[in-house]
Structures are given as C-alpha cells and as structure tokens.
Amino acid sequence: MSVFSFKSVSVTANNSSFVFLRYDRARLSLRSRLPLPPGPKRLPIIGNLLQIVTSGKPFWETVHEWSKIYGTKSGTSFISSQDTVSEFTVKKASIYSSRPRYIMPVISGFGWTTVALPYTAELRRQRAILQKFFFNSDVLNYTEIQQRESYEFLKNLLRSPGKYDKHAHHLPASTIMMNVYGHEVEADDPYLQLADESGRAFIEYFSYIFLDLLPWMQSLPEWFPGTGFMKVAREGRELSDKVRHRLYSLTKSKMMNGTAKESMTTKLLGEAANTGKANNAETEEEFADVSAMMFLAGSDTTVTSIMNLVLAVLQFPDTLRRAQEEIDRVVGIDRLPTFEDKENLPYINAMCTEVMRWEVVAPLALPRCAAQDDEFRGYHIPAGTLVLPNVWSIANNSEVYPNPSQFKPERWLPGGVNEKSIRPMSYALGSGRRCLFITAASLFATFNIERALDANGKPSPLGGHEWSIVRFVTPSTCKFTPRSEKAAALIREANGSV
C-alpha cells in the first residue's frame, strides 16, 4: 500500500531533486510576481490525486517523470546533486527547518517524535542529542556491540537459513537496544516484537494525510462511516506509551540496582545527575522521547539495507564472488572480519554505498515546511509549502549514475566515475553504516548465497519492495551455504562479548 494518499494537493516538479507540495488550504502570498514551480495540470478539489493514483508507479517515480517534462519546459536545469539539497537544508535552514504537523501521528500519541515536531527548542535539543550519540563513534563503543551482533546473525543463519529475514530484523534491533538502553536481547524477546510493531505502525500513520486536508473528521463519532482511523489512533496511543516508557523505566531500574550496562540512556541520566537535573519531569520526558525515537527508527533502514544487499548478490552474483576474493586476500580464511579490516576492504565498502543508491531505503526524505514565502531559482515558494528531497530521483539520475538500475559497486572505488559524487549513504545514521559494513563483510566471508530452484529447475522469484516511505523488502527464496566446514567452525566459535 502506498503511504501517500493525497486528496487536494498541488504537485510541482521543476527538477528531479525536490518535490514541492502545496495544500489548497495553504495561505498563498498574492504579492509575489514570480511564478510557482511548474507542474502537471490540476483538477478542481482533488488536485493531482488522479494522476498520482492512476500512474501505476510509486509516487517518487511519477514525480521523477514529471520533472523531466516540466523541468525542460521551464528551462530549469536538471539537477541531481547534494548541492541542491544543501541549498534548502543548510543555506536556507532558517526557512526550511520546520516539519509539517501531521494530524494522525499526533492523535496516535507520536507527536513527540523528532520527525513530527515543529522547529522549536524541543526539536533542537533532540537533534543535538542524536548528533552527539549517533554521529560520534567516540561517545559509545558501537563497534564491539555491532561486531557481536553480526556474529549472532551468522550463528542464527547457520541454524536456520530459511529464516534469514527474521535474523536480519533481529540484528539491528538488538544493536539499537543495546546502544540506546543497554538491553541485551534474548531469543523471542518481547521488545523485538514491540520494535517491529511500533516501527511499522509509526510509518503507517503518515498514510492518513486526508486528515490534514479534512481535519474536521477528528470530531466525528467513532461509529460514523470512514472513521476507522480513530480505532487505529486509540491503539497507537497505547503503543506510544509502551515505546516511550517500558525500556526507559527498565534501564532506570537497572541503574538503581547497579546492573545497568553503558548506553545512551545511562549517559543522559548520568549527565543530568551531574548537572542537578536528575528527576526533573521535563528532562525525563525529553530523554524518554529521544531514546524511544531511536528505538523506533534505528533499525528499519538497516534491516532494509541488509535485505537489499542479499537481493543484490542474488541478482548480480559476480559481485559476491569479487567480494569474497577481496576478503580472502585481506582477511584470510582463519578468522572473521572485524572493523579493523574496514580500510583494507574497499570493495565491501563500495557495495555498502552502492546498495544504498541502487535500492533507496527511504525514497523521499522527511518533508520540510517553508516557514515564510521564499524564492528558489526564479520561482515563488509560498509559506506552508512542503519540500521533499526526492532521494530516489537523485540516486537514479542516469546522467550521474550510468545504468542506474545496475548494481555496480565499482562506481565508488578510487577512480570510479562516482567517487566524488553524491553519496546516498549520507542519509543514514553513522551507526547504521557501520552495522551494514560488518554484516556484509562477515556474511560474505562465511556464506555462499544462491537463488533457490523451483520444481522445474528454474530460479525462484526474488523478493520485492513495498510502496511506503521505508521500502521494506519481502524475502527471496534462496540458499545460504557455509563456504567451507572451516567457515562454519569459525561461526560456531565466534564470540563478541560486551
């Protein structure tokens, strides 16, 4: 199901990097003599909805095609570079730092999340905490945790290779819970189910955009036809409370009895105690919120990247052979790869970068909202306009990435055509990039991965992608076989105790 269900929305596409959305109810400036960015002709009331739902393509691909048409007619350059993104998010950050206030996440109890907050002091504090802990590897020892969890992934894969998608979900979720809460995940851990349930629910809430266009529907009685969202919102509030407080409270209890392991939460609470802010209700809620935000969002993108990597080597088996040759040459066959090998494994690093470009996990970056009227390259951007970086379009620009549908890690090797070009990996948290690397290196060092054959001896179908703001991958029917008995023994003997 598509997450996008626009009802009365203007879509303009003057270049392939950005999508501009304007609700009919947005307040437009009549003083500007500049034209609005060009776009397809709109219908009364429903705007561009009909073109979107009848295109037969995901929204981001439809807008990509429109950008070729309207960008050319307007004489606007066909732009697919990080420079354009930076113009909005860095140079004009004072105008485009706020987020639109979507109704469904708010009434479902998730208005506290970083992606749902307007540009306020609260949002700035949350961003500062995330910047400190997840873009700075010196604050917490992520590598030891991630390496241990990658070994657990291999062990699970050795025991039950047919459940590789389940193991892929377990890996980053376990890492995030240890990083954020110091919680060591066990088999069938209830918090794993909570992470999966809450993460998918949170993404689904953004599909209820009709509420932003018809806000009066919130006032209807729950028995009224078309108000099924009210039951979803009620259940969401219960889910939100669990996400915010269960693991946070568990971590606090462990701190009190001296059994807590170091994590983002313990460091935040420790710093609060040192500055006299311990037991401050507002501070406690802020810590609980930012910790829960990482619990929600930290694993979905990494899971999808791991699943995409498996999909890539199934479709392009030569890349797996080349990766294994590099690992055998650099690491050898007597041990498993570690983070110390990272700088000496350029092809593995290139595979991790290319998979983020080849199948973009989040095709549209989180929307920004114009806080005031603005001008962008000769066009008028009214206050209230939503600006969405079209990451899928950037990553599939054939002028920058020849044959974009091909998985070609060599693009990113020294001397490759894209060595100094946009790196889609920059959209991922630092901890997610590291987790992807050690998982890829460990997996390719120890397993061969092949498509399974059906009863007629033909390759089984490969998995596909959901049309959502995170493009979840369905598993493929495939075979994971240890490369040798020695590789299997390395897996069984591996440990990464923290």
Image (cartoon, rainbow, N blue to C red):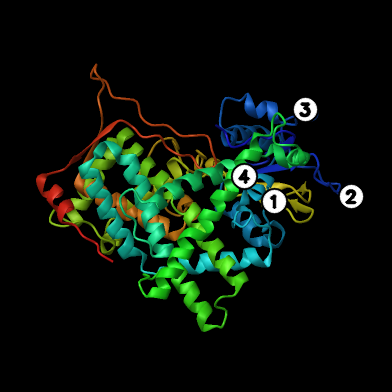
Which of these two is toward me, 84 or 473? 473
Which of these two is toward me, 121 or 349? 121
Does residue 64 appear left or right of residue 38 in this picture? left
- Mark 4 or 3, nearer chain start: 3
Viewer-nearest of discs 2 and 4: 4
Query: Residue lying furthest top in this view?
Result: 456
- According to the picture, the residue beneath numbered tag 2 turns out to be 31
Does residue 269 appear left or right of residue 120 in this picture? left
Mark 4–mark 3 distance (CA, rounded to whole Å) = 35 Å
Q: In the drawing, what numbered circle is on residue 43? A: 3
Q: Are marks 4 and 3 in contact (CB under 8 Å)?
A: no
- Mark 1 or 3, nearer chain start: 3
- According to the picture, the residue beneath numbered tag 1 turns out to be 101
| Residue 413 visible in image | no
* Neighbours of disc 4 within 10 Å: few (<14), some (14-19), many (20+): few
Residue at 58 percent of width and 46 percent of height: 236
Q: Secondary structure at mark 1?
A: loop
* Neighbours of disc 2 within 10 Å: few (<14), some (14-19), many (20+): few
Mark 1–mark 2 distance (CA, rounded to whole Å) = 26 Å
Q: In the drawing, what numbered circle is on residue 234? A: 4
- Mark 3 or 2, nearer chain start: 2
* Neighbours of disc 1 within 10 Å: few (<14), some (14-19), many (20+): some
Mark 1–mark 3 distance (CA, rounded to whole Å) = 25 Å
| Amino acid type shown at disc 2 | Arg
| Amino acid type shown at disc 4 | Arg
The image position of residue 314, as x and y in percent, is 30, 35
Mark 3–mark 2 distance (CA, rounded to whole Å) = 25 Å
